[in-house]
Amino acid sequence: MKSTIIALFLCTISCYCLSAIKVKFQVSYLKFENTFALSASGDTDVGMDLLESWKNKVNDICGSKKAVVIINNGNPIIRNTRDSDTYSKVNGQWVRNKDKASVYGIVRCSAT
């Protein structure tokens, strides 16, 4: 019983931590009607942590219309934090930059 309570407590804390991620969205509306590109990034190194927020933003934008991802076989592109192709000089040393975790997709809002 005591171990069950501890497990529930830890689960609650981890769920709270995941939901507390600050997510930054970038929306670009494309020339095609009801089509947009949406990217999400945030304070995490794991792209899957951003997926739920990305899906919620897609649903907010499409409203009652059906959201269809039109790239990557119908799935958004999910990337974890990784080394970038760019470098910065820090304290006289060249250091490779990092690209933060992200979720990206091109979405069409359709009536059906």
Image (cartoon, rainbow, N blue to C red):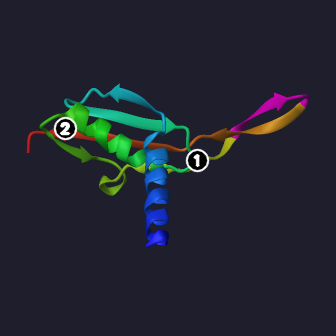
SS at circle 2:
strand
* Residue nearer the viewer, 104 or 47: 47
| Mark 2 or mark 1, whichever is nearer to me | 1
Of the image marks 2 and 1, the number of the one nearer the N terminus:
1
Graded by Cα atoms within 10 Å as few (under 14), some (14 to 19) or many (20 or more), the crowding at tag 2 reads many
Residue 28: x %, y % from top left: 36, 27
Magenta span contains residue 98: no
Q: Quadrant of the C terminus?
A: top left
- The amino acid beneath tag 1 is Asp
Q: Quadrant of the N terminus?
A: bottom left
Q: Does residue 48 show up? A: no
| Residue 111 horizontal side relative to residue 55, left or right | left
How far from the left and from the top, in percent, is residue 32?
A: 23, 30
Q: CA distance from mark 2 to mark 1?
A: 29 Å
Quadrant of residue 90 in the image?
A: top right
Numbered mark located on residue 45 in the image: 1
* Residue at position x 44%, y 64% in the image: 5
Q: Is residue 36 above or below residue 100?
A: above
Q: Which residue is the site of mark 2?
A: 109
Query: What are the residue bounds of the magenta stretch?
Result: 85-92
The chief SS type of the magenta part is strand
In the rendering, at what x and y percent does residue 70 appear? 29, 47
Q: Residue at x 42, y 31 (%)?
A: 25
- What residue is drawn where x is 81% and y is 38%? 95
